[in-house]
Structure formats: C-alpha cells, structure tokens
Image (spheres, rainbow, N blue to C red):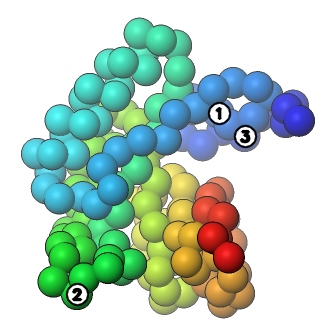
Amino acid sequence: MIVTKKIEISNGVKIGGGDMVLIAGPCVAESLEVCREIAGFMTELCAKKGVSYIFKASFDKANRSSVASYRGPGLDEGLAILAEIKREFGVPVLTDVHLPSQAMKIAETADILQIPAFLCRQTDLLLACGETGKPVNIKKGQF
C-alpha cells in the first residue's frame, strides 16, 4: 500500500506519497569524522539519484552481545555529532531513544526518534517519544 499523504520531516524531506527516502548511516556514531565521511558520501549519492536522505546513527548501542563492545559516545557527545551533521550537510537526522527520560532532550536535535527493536513494546518509551511531537520510527521486534 502506498501512503498518499506526505509528511515533511525537515529541509524538504518528505515521507509518504510513494517517494523514496533512504535512512542510512553508521550503526553507532563512532566519531564526528566517521559520521562526516558517511554523511558526505550518502548526501552526494542520494542527490545524484534523486532520493531524499536521512542520516541515522546511534549514540548508544545498548544491545551489544559483549559488555566489552564499544557502545557509542554517549548522549551528549552523540547529540553534538548529530547536530553537526545536520548543520553541515543540511540533512534530517534520526537516532535511537532508549529511556523515556531521554525523549525530549533527543527531540531537540533529532528530526525523527527511533525505538530500537528490542524496546518496541515498552509503552512508557513509546508514549514519551510520541509526546515530543516528532515522527517516531518503531523498529519491528524479532519476537
């Protein structure tokens, strides 16, 4: 089914109406330099192909299989990286929200809030994200 209503996310990027939108970026915001490299490449590629682009990176990947694995730069540094990518490349940004208490702060920077698959049934988290007024991408749980 094609959604005929278009919803503007940011900077002219619209979702719906059959237009293609690519959401892509590093799984975790390893550094500003890595995010810049990916955002630059993807912005240029999507512009050439006529596809809208939304940059995605997480500041904390709390679902690692090893406690020793790198989880990310944390909330404050991660949001600073996303804000810089948004400013420098003029693209909307998306990131995960893990706790209801994070939703409003993240919504100050992110254009779209994402619920990780392993948290998709957490009612308080879903409500907190919805209360920000931002679009929410809910990843499907693997249950």
Q: Position of residue 42 (x, y in %)?
A: 34, 28
Q: Say if residue 11 shows up in the picture.
A: no
Hey, what amino acid is under mark 2?
Val
Q: Is residue 65 visible?
A: yes
Say above or below: 33 vs 39. Answer: below
How many residues crowd around disc 1 within 10 Å: few (fewer than 14), some, or many (20 or more)?
Answer: some
Q: Upstream in the sequence, badge 1 or badge 3?
A: 3
Residue shown at 54%/63% (left/top)? Answer: 113
Q: Quadrant of the N terminus?
A: top right
The answer to whether 142 appears left or right of 86 in the picture is: right
- Near mark 3 (Cα within 10 A), the count class, few <14, some 14-19 or many ≥20, is few
Q: Is mark 2 on a helix, strand or loop?
A: loop
Asked if the residue at tag 2 contacts the one at tag 1, i.e. Cβ–Cβ closer than 8 Å, the answer is no
Is residue 99 toward the left or the right of residue 25 in the image?
right
Q: Which of 128 and 98 is in front in this view?
A: 98
According to the picture, the residue beneath numbered tag 1 turns out to be 14
> Mark 1 against mark 2, which lies toward the viewer?
2
Residue 118 quadrant = bottom right
Q: Distance between the residues labelled 1 and 2?
A: 38 Å
Residue 7 — which label? 3
* SS of the residue under disc 3: strand
At label 3, the amino acid type is Ile
Q: Estimate the spatial distance between the alpha carbons at disc 1 and disc 3, rounded to whole Å.
A: 5 Å
Q: Report which quarter residue 123 is drawn in.
A: bottom right
Question: In the image shown, does 116 or 114 lie closer to the viewer?
Answer: 116
